Image (spheres, rainbow, N blue to C red):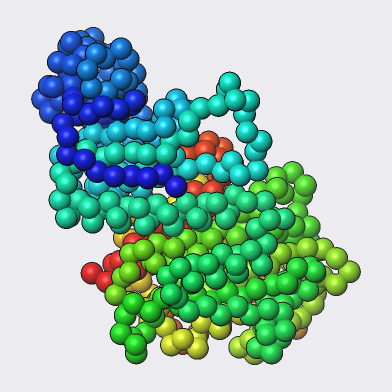
Amino acid sequence: MLAVSINSVPPAEVGTALLFVALPENPNLSGIAGLDAATQGALTRSIEMKDFRGSRDEMLHLTGIVKGPRRLILLGLGVVTDRRAAFKRAATLAARNANRLGVGEMVWYSGQITPEETESITIGLIAGSWEYADLKSPAPEAERKKPLERAVILTSNTDDSRKGLAGGQAIGSGQSLARRLAMMPGNLCTPEYLAETAADIAKRYSMGITVLGRKEMEAERMGSFLAVAQGTPQEPKLIVLEYKGGKPNAKPIVLVGKGLCFDSGGISIKPAQGMEFMKFDMCGGAGVLGTFEALGQMQPALNVIGIVGATTNMPSGTAMNPGDVVKAQNGKSIEIINTDAEGRLVLADCLSYAKRFDPDVVIDAATLTGACVIALGHTASGVFSSDDALVAEILAAGKRAGEPAWPLPLWDDYKELIKSDVADVKNSGGRPAGAVTAAMFLKEFAEGYPWAHLDIAGTAYSETDLVTIPKGPTGVPTGMFIEFIRGRVR
């Protein structure tokens, strides 16, 4: 992961291969007069000639500077209404470009910044430098470029700034882990691998861990989870991490993540086109593990439980069939209408299992429905809860994290769509209000505690390049989870 540090040296005096200077629209050079002098007035001329206007994502690259930085890139912030969000986006873009240039190190300057802004810049730099190259052969030696390994933020070197840096490094670590797990192919990132990753986190940060396999889940009567797992020879895993930073008797926050390491759809098989993206069906679980990586570094003063339901959904002679009826851990019977509505079956037993922890609140995250993508696109995650105050808390956490969300209804009228003729409930209500009926189904198993559901199907990964990050996993919902937890500490 990118090593980020801070330094209070003036930007004109920093000796670096590459300096990024972030400026808003219609920039004023009063804060970088020294740099302008070092470039013999090139910055002033560029702005006067409108070669650089400060528009969002705009860049102007200058080289041949005699003293100080060898390369200088002006980076536009656009019209800034949210400084943290603007800095985070620009820092991500800066790190991506530094990676392409192959300079190995870079320096960031954006004038006077707060510790919170230092944190956001750090998160952005780490996100932009991230790439998954584990399985690629090295380029020929003559074509190799240095990966970005070090970045320095120019700001005051105070305790508060160092605290902001540490927070950004922790969140960046968590998001990087979540993205790496999601990007790994399904034959490598298996339920067993997710359990090993959780065990590594628990060992490094002295957390509690419990892992249930098929036999243990049978003993727990998790018929809903096991119905999904009965079609695969891989051992399913219910992974539980326990972070105990609060008082011993304080009720914990419980985070639940869907961990479908690959989802073929089962007997209700998906179309072949685009099925390779179904390795991302474990992004909810990856987000939980990424959050615990960050928690281990941040050490907040409260208790948090993480639950990941990990398996694969495959067609086979032993796979569940449409029309089958299974019984969940809480005793409710479920008619299987569509075997591709499997994530909710896994989460049903995870949510029932969560009750034993006497939680203060439970939030689950899952790449659950294509219907949510149709409703909200790839910009916002869907939030479902009957608790309006909890919804508001989650929306605020998402805004702070730069992971926006939007509430969708959870009215009792929708329950009619998941009534079954032969069981207590059915696992699919059809196409109308598909994201809502999926949440209504989960609500049947989230009993005895405040609960919210995040549908991250449209936000957990992207099939196209997003300018600031490449196509693939985004790290959602790691940032939102962390901000929700920090909001409870404040």
- Position of residue 456 measured from the top left corner of the image (x, y, whole percent): 52, 57
Quarter of the image where one finds residue 421: bottom right
38 displayed left or right of 189: left
From where the camera sits, is residue 68 visible? yes
**198 or 409: which is nearer to us?**
198
Q: Which residue is located at x 78 percent, y 68 percent?
A: 232
Q: Which residue is located at x 35 percent, y 71 percent?
A: 390
Question: Where is 419 relative to 466, above or below?
Answer: below
**210 or 124: which is nearer to us?**
210
Question: Where is 143 relative to 79, above or below?
Answer: above
Q: Which residue is located at x 67 percent, y 83 percent?
A: 217
Q: Quadrant of the C terminus?
A: bottom left
Q: Which residue is located at x 55 percent, y 71 percent?
A: 199
- Position of residue 250 measured from the top left corner of the image (x, y, whole percent): 33, 86
Q: Residue furthest right?
A: 317
- Position of residue 45 measured from the top left corner of the image (x, y, whole percent): 20, 10
From where the camera sits, is residue 415 visible? no
